[in-house]
Image (cartoon, helix red, strand yellow):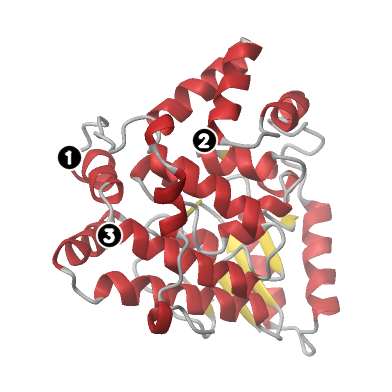
Amino acid sequence: MCWGHYLEQTKGAKCSELVYGQTNISTAKAVTDAGKVGDRLSQDFFREEYILNNAIGTYQKPYVALIDGITMGGGVGLSVHGRFRVATEKTMFAMPETGIGLFPDVGGGYFLPRLQGKLGLFLALTGFRIKGRDVQQAGVASHFVDSEKLPSLEKDLVQLKTPSNTDVAGVLNSYQAQSKLDDGKPFILAEHMDQINRLFEASSVEDIMQKLNEDGSSFALKQLETLKKMSPTSLKITFRQLQDGASMSLQEVLVMEYRLSQACMRGHDFYEGVRAVLIDRDQSPKWKPGVVEEVTEDLVDGCFKSLGSNDLKL
């Protein structure tokens, strides 16, 4: 049995007893620095990450991720594809990649379009953050347990004599039943799901933005304002990524996403996004192209093209 424990301040990574994961500024800077000079790190980082995501998604033994903190990017990839994902009141989940000129990778093209309605597309394009029990209600986590109970939960999992999926589920279900924090609280986006499903049911990013503008509600206009801050290229890549990924296997999605990762390494917006959001932190990225209408279909198509012998092999 392998289980993961995701903490905001962890530094290591292993998969023996506990798995620690994070996406941090130093990693993003290392990848951007490598990409600028054509160093293999910009290829190997994504390749090895996606191979690991696939290993987790196909792992035969029970895999339990305890996502007790900030869970974004790489931390999502290390948890969401496992059979069991345990959120706590401290969990904060988001896929904010369109804000740094990237896309919701690590298999986002697989799990996001499989969430309820258009929720996955909404989360992917806007980077909206969900916390605590909402992470389970969204379908990202399979269970919710009070954080104070995690040490005891880990102990009981370790002591299982026959850690089958059924036995692990039994332990997790028991701890979930004991956890009363925010029990019965409605999903944070419940009152907006009809809007999300209607406004994000579209044939293009431009169509979504037009619908949001025409809707005119405070919620819709807030999402429109958010989308206008994101990388236009990332928005269009992400829209197609989820559109295609809805009918793909996890392996097919990861191959597609590796192609997209390398397209981002060849482009402009990822470097500019990391600079503006993570390094200089002026929050004023200068995207190229600057608006979604200028992102051509040829540009998007080029991001999805095969890399030939350099394609990801799983």
**x%, y% of residue 173?**
83, 62
Quarter of the image where one finds residue 264: bottom left
**x%, y% of residue 226?**
46, 27
Q: Amino acid at mark 1?
A: Asp
The disc label shown at residue 280, or none: 1
Pointer 3 residue: 266
Residue 29 visible in rendering: yes
Q: Nearer the viewer, residue 131 or 80?
A: 80
Task: Tell me which residue sits at (68%, 26%) in the image.
Answer: 199
Q: CA distance from mark 2 to mark 1?
A: 22 Å
Vertical order, 142 against 231 (above or below): below
What is the crowding at mark 1: few (fewer than 14 residues within 10 Å), some, or many (at least 20)?
few
Viewer-side label of 3, 2:
3
| Dot placed on the residue nearer the N-terminal end, 1 or 3 | 3
User: In the image, 149: left or right of 308?
Assistant: right
| Dot placed on the residue nearer the N-terminal end, 3 or 2 | 2
Pointer 2 residue: 126
Mark 2 element type: helix
**x%, y% of residue 103?**
45, 51
Task: Tell me which residue sits at (39%, 62%) in the image.
Answer: 261
Q: Amino acid at mark 2?
A: Thr
Quadrant of the rendering where the N terminus is positioned: bottom right
